Image: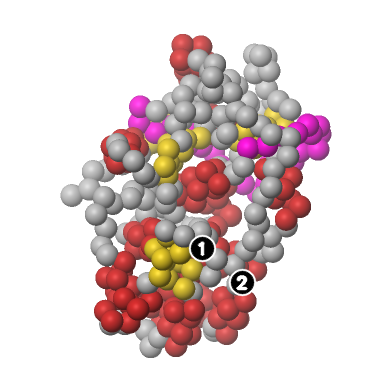
């Protein structure tokens, strides 16, 4: 039986005192020898999968089929029509600070948050604190393909490819099932799998990687995909920064006004995240201004040293420790002060 999740909500003033005390005692994320190397120039690869097939399928579906998809997977289908703005991506990565896992504009901080991603993707039918955890011995890729497509073992074995040491399947192998599978739920599920593999977690152009299949199968168990998406977003951002005036920044989407914010898990001083290929941490207390809340000194000790890949000896223990910490999630009541700073924040 799965261990229940404990949710604790605490007052803003109490967390402010705890955060300031913790930062003083444990130190900042930027400790000696761990200062980020932020080059002046970077090259960003913004190549994108061809999504015309997905757009065509979505446009062919009737309203009932689209409703079934949205009820199961939220608004992720809208991602297939968004065009990548190469210049915007180039600009954004220049402001990314890996020590704090946030964008830094002079002394102003901003980062995507779990609450914002959940609102944008409108993924409602999940358990907020139930995260995806990589299983040490998942089912074989062939068995997953057979289960998701209803095809036979011989077909599945033939479709599996290896590209640059990455085990995957071509999108073209699934296209026909998405278009014509007799089971409407199978068509919907495979279409969602294609979005996660080609749009949200693309690794090999035109292919869906085995790790995406592992993740996707867990979605049916009520796993919240947002922490996983956020983890791989952070891990994929390059490390560059340049000057920008504070008045050039829009801090929030005005329609996202949560009353509470997830700020830590278990014994961690911030939120640990597990992606498909590694783990990372982020400190939501850095960016309270995005929710019109008073910005105070955040606890960040150890954040810069937390990122790791799912490789080498000992990583599964770290995965288990993070999964355990998510069994106790802490929320803070947001105090709405219309974008104000405490006096000691700049220091």
How far from the left and from the top, in percent, is residue 139? 25, 62
Name the residue located 70 percent from the left edge and 29 percent from the top edge. 108
Q: Of label 1 and label 2, which has the lower sequence position?
A: 2
**Outermost front residue:** 164
How far from the left and from the top, in percent, is residue 19? 50, 20
Residue 125 visible at all: no
Mark 1 and mark 2: span between their CA atoms? 12 Å
Q: Main secondary structure of the magenta part?
A: loop
Residue at which label 2 appears: 50
Q: Which residues are magenta?
A: 239-267
Q: How many numbered badges does the structure rendering display?
A: 2
Q: Does residue 91 show up magenta in the picture? A: no
Name the residue located 42 percent from the left edge and 58 percent from the top edge. 165
Based on the displayed image, in which of its 4 quarters is residue 158 positioned? bottom left
Categorize mark 2 by other alpha carbons within 10 Å: few (<14), some (14-19), many (20+): few
Q: Does residue 250 show up magenta in the picture? A: yes
Residue 204: numbered disc: 1
């Amino acid at each position: 039986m799965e261990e229940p999740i404990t949710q604790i909500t605490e007052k803003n003033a109490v967390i402010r005192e705890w955060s300031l005390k913790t930062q003083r005692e444990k130190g900042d994320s930027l400790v000696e020898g761990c200062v980020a190397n932020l080059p002046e120039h970077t090259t960003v690869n913004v190549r994108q999968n061809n999504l015309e097939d997905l757009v065509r399928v979505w446009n062919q579906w009737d309203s009932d089929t689209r409703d079934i998809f949205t009820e199961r997977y939220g608004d992720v289908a809208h991602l297939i029509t968004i065009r990548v703005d190469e210049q915007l991506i180039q600009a954004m990565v220049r402001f990314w600070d890996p020590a704090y896992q946030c964008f830094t504009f002079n002394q102003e901080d901003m980062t995507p948050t779990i609450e914002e991603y959940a609102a944008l993707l409108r993924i409602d039918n999940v358990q907020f604190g139930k995260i995806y955890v990589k299983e040490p011995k998942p089912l074989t890729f062939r068995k997953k393909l057979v289960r998701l497509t209803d095809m036979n073992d011989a077909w599945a074995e033939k479709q599996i490819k290896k590209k640059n040491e990455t085990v995957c399947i071509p999108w073209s192998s699934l296209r026909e099932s998405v278009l014509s599978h007799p089971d409407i739920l199978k068509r919907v599920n495979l279409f969602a799998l294609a979005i996660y593999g080609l749009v949200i977690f693309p690794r090999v152009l035109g292919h869906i990687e085995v790790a995406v299949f592992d993740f996707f199968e867990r979605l049916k168990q009520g796993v919240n995909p947002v922490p996983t998406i956020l983890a791989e977003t952070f891990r994929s951002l390059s490390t560059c920064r340049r000057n920008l005036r504070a008045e050039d920044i829009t801090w929030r989407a005005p329609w996202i006004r949560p009353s509470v914010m997830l700020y830590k898990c278990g014994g961690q001083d911030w939120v640990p995240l597990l992606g498909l290929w590694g783990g990372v941490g982020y400190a939501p207390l850095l960016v309270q201004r995005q929710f019109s809340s008073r910005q105070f000194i955040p606890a960040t000790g150890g954040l810069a040293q937390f990122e790791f890949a799912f490789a080498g000896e000992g990583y599964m223990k770290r995965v288990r420790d993070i999964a355990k910490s998510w069994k106790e999630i802490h929320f803070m009541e947001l105090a709405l002060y219309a974008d104000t700073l405490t006096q000691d924040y700049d220091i």
